[in-house]
Amino acid sequence: MQDHVDVAVIGAGHAGLNAVKEIRKTTDRFVLINGGELGTTCARVGCMPSKVAIHLAELYQSRQRFGHYGIVGAEALKVDQAAALEHVRDLRDTFVDLVMANTTDEMGDELVEGFARFIDANTLAVGNRLIHAKAIVIATGASTMIPLGWKQQLGDRLLTVETLFEQERLPESVAVIGLGPIGVEMGQALHRLGTKVVGVDVGTRIARVQDPEINRLAVEILEREFPVWLGAPVAVERVGEQVRVTQGDREILVDSIFVATGRRPNIEGLDLGKVGCVLDAHGVPLYDPRTLQVGRFPIYLTGDATGGVANLQIAAAQGQVAGYNACHAKPRTLDAKTPMSIVFSDPNIAVVGTPWSQLSADVVVGQQRFGPVGRALIMGSNRGLLRLYADGRTGIVLGGAMVGPRCEHLAHLLAWGIESRMTAEQMLAMPYYHPVIEEALQDALHDLLKGLRRVAPLRTEISSRLGSVARWRRRVSAAS
Ligand SMILES: Cc1cc2nc3c(=O)[nH]c(=O)nc-3n(C[C@H](O)[C@H](O)[C@H](O)COP(=O)(O)OP(=O)(O)OC[C@H]3O[C@@H](n4cnc5c(N)ncnc54)[C@H](O)[C@@H]3O)c2cc1C
Ligand SMILES: NC(=O)c1ccc[n+]([C@@H]2O[C@H](COP(=O)([O-])OP(=O)(O)OC[C@H]3O[C@@H](n4cnc5c(N)ncnc54)[C@H](O)[C@@H]3O)[C@@H](O)[C@H]2O)c1
């Protein structure tokens, strides 16, 4: 048992496990401390079980189109909720086993089970045990942020992703509170698996989409399945075995609420006050987003614990950089990649590159509806819109937002083009097949190019006029 180590990593999620992978290349004097269940948030309650539930729900939902295709008898299909939930848990267990098999299962004394807290910048306490480390990586993840007092008031009527998949049956009715990625994905899956759903959000945007056209259409598409209430504070109250949910003058009685109002970094119990580092308003230590170092302390912050974008690939990349920097004097910096968000609703909702709010006035927008796209029509899923943004001066593609079928793939193509700093013209010069969903991207690029060509003469005209004004000014000042 090592109580003096080179590095202590707190948290065995993807950030912590990737940190350990990197640390092993330099030293075997490390410990990985994990409180709570092993197996990572992604595999236990996050990315993976949620996608299993979404897949089941989508399969079952497709019965509604069977009649149009000449496949008869679909009305007789039923979903056995208990069996469906059992399947989610079975696959969840497989994912957990896969993660643990070549990580924590192979560890001996390096794995310390228990919750860590700081004694000082180089010392952690886990129960009665003190661990001294030259460097510490914080990779403690995040948990559902539940509005104050709701848990006490609603008891077992309140569900979160941490408890949803443990249910034997789904509630008959649910209000999904918070329509970020989790609320949209799980709200739609619950609805399709037979629960009566209402989706409620204090804001007016869903799935973190900023582009107003995509947001409007995404809300419209979701509303065809269940009511969506937006744009006002939400109150909840337990009424017997049910919950009353109120927003403005609307109210509904439901069996349970599913809370998806965001996730809060698991930082509170770490006792970071003992370190003396500067904390932000949420208690998260200030850190360098490139090196992940907390102030000048030998401490590195990674993954969901940063309170930044919660995304598996980012957590893993941060873990690697933090693990490296915890063992080396010369720090490595995080390689910032084109941001991407994919919400696995049906249809998918995705945002890539520069977000709408950060685009300059020079931006040109091109778009394509999925309505006439051949592949989308064949799939019986042609609702949606793809919007692309390019720099009006250079034609370089900056970003895009989309709601439509298989946007998970289009988002990647777009991200790869942006990462390579391609212009709309260069992306159009890439090969395309037929009939594929990628043709939606091809059409949107054509529209974007048209827009760019429209602004080009205007831009030449403006710059030549600006040029003559400048020449005139120079002449006037030379003459005076
Ligand atoms: C429902 C849901 C769906 C998601 N879907 C996607 C998706 O489709 N795509 C995507 O990219 N991302 C998705 N995410 C986000 C993704 O799962 C997370 O970004 C990622 O798993 C975070 O990894 P992490 O290592 O930072 O944290 P975690 O995996 O949460 O690991 C943190 C670990 O630290 C432990 N811990 C906490 N406090 C202490 C302490 N004091 N001492 C010791 N140990 C401690 C915890 O028990 C846990 O084991 C989803 C998340 C959720 C909840
Ligand atoms: N497919 C994916 O990649 C995926 C899937 C799920 C989660 N995630 C990640 O997990 C993290 C958490 O997701 P999330 O959806 O829980 O959080 P979020 O912060 O993205 O969204 C929370 C939503 O809840 C609303 N809200 C907050 N407080 C509220 C209140 N009191 N009443 C009503 N509405 C309220 C907010 O307006 C917001 O729309 C995100 O970073 C997300 O990117 C990713």
Image (spheres, rainbow, N blue to C red):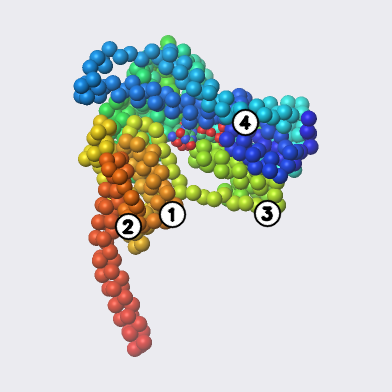
Is residue 341 visible from the viewing direction of this image? yes
Is residue 201 in view?
no
View extreme (bottom): residue: 479
Q: Earlier in the sequence, mark 3 or mark 4?
A: 4
Which of the numbered marks, if any, corresponds to residue 425? 2
Q: Which mark is residue 330?
A: 3
Q: Are marks 2 and 1 in contact (CB under 8 Å)?
A: no
Query: Mark 4 highlights which residue?
Result: 102
Which of discs 3 and 2 lies nearer the camera? The answer is 2
Mark found first going from the N terminus, 3 or 1: 3
Q: Position of residue 178 (x, y in %)?
A: 41, 30
- Tell me, yes or no, whether the two marked residues, 3 and 4, touch with CB atoms within 8 Å: no
The quarter of the picture where the N terminus appears is top right
Question: Is 421 rendered above or below residue 260?
Answer: below
Return the x and y of residue 271 as percentages of the image width and height. 67, 34
Q: Which residue is tagged 1?
A: 420
Earlier sequence position, callout 2 versus callout 1: 1
Q: Could you tell me the amino acid type at mark 1? A: Ser
Q: Is residue 36 above or below residue 389?
A: above
Pointer 4 and pointer 1: residues touching (CB < 8 Å)? no
Q: Nearer the viewer, mark 4 or mark 2?
A: 4
Q: Amino acid at mark 2?
A: Glu
For marks 4 and 2, give the CA distance: 45 Å
Q: Secondary structure at mark 2?
A: helix
